[in-house]
Image: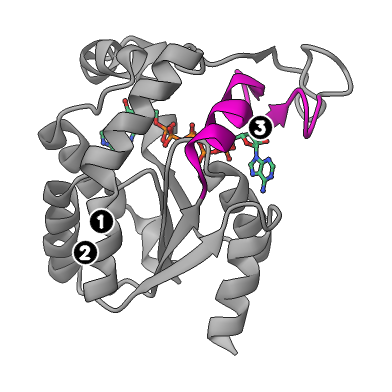
Amino acid sequence: MRIILLGAPGAGKGTQAESIKKKYPIAHISTGDILRANVKAGTELGKCAKEYMDAGKLVPDELIIKMVGARLAEADCKEGFMLDGFPRTTAQAEALKAILAQLGMKLDAVANLVIDDETVVSRLVSRRVCKKCGEIYNTVMKPCSTGSVCEKCGGEVIQRDDDKESVIRNRLSVFHEQTAPLIDYYTKEGVLVNVDSSGGKDAVLKILEQMRG
Ligand code: AP5
């Protein structure tokens, strides 16, 4: 299975990915997670990406395309993959098309998580994540029962630097300007499926299962 999870910040791409992974053990490629790991490790990529991420802007296409191209060529992607947060611009979508053609692969579906801006803001200001394992919590919808200690791994549960309201609103503007055109792009490619983001954490999984019969 080769799929893309498309949607605004906070639409629930990471949450849906967790449900899909439990059923289909395919590679989960979250460009946000890879970038945050690079920031934490202090790599050149991380140093370059940090200022864009903190401002809620997109990291330049050439850096992202190189990073994803290398990841898709890894052995675990042969059995399938789930792209979470990539592509985010038309240039990234065109690059992905070329990379997949080179690898002899085709996309099965692009799940577009539909959500309104105010729901995004209220979800993201209350989101908390585990610094160690990435488990996603929400102070309103899914509080961590052990406070700031992750229920799964004991890591520290924190608020992301870009989950402040002013940065969230910048991320939303960037989404509408640069990423939303991909809805039309993948509709024309015949692979887009709209999914109501309020439909529960396994909404995309249910649609994928229907598609597979
Ligand atoms: P990234 O980490 O990809 O952030 P994002 O796209 O803004 O998405 P989020 O991780 O914020 O949200 P999500 O959709 O995964 O939602 P989640 O499941 O956590 O990117 C961060 C930055 O990296 C970017 O701003 C950019 O700078 C850079 N970057 C990354 N990729 C790039 C690229 N391709 N090109 C250039 N730059 C790039 O859920 C959110 C909250 O809602 C949680 O608290 C969750 O519990 C709750 N929730 C989820 N689903 C539901 C539901 N159904 N009902 C109620 N609550 C729910």
Asked whether residue 208 is in view, the answer is yes
Give the vertical position of 33 relative to 191 (above or below). above
Asked whether residue 73 is in view, the answer is no
Residue position marked by numbered label 2 in the rendering: 185
Residue position marked by numbered label 1 in the rendering: 182
Residue 178 spot, x, y in % from top left: 21, 41
Label 1's element?
Answer: helix
Q: Which amino acid does label 1 sit on?
A: Leu
Q: Give the range drawn in magenta.
A: 115-143
Q: What residue type is labelled 3?
A: Ile
State yes or no: Cβ of the residue under disc 3 lies below 8 Å from any atom of ligand 1.
Answer: yes
Residue 133 part of the magenta segment: yes
Q: How many marks?
A: 3
- Left or right of 74: which side holds 117? right
- Left or right of 195: which side holds 142? right
144 vs 187, nearest the viewer:
187
Q: Callout 2 environment at 10 Å: few (<14), some (14 to 19), or many (20+)?
A: some
Residue 136's mark? 3
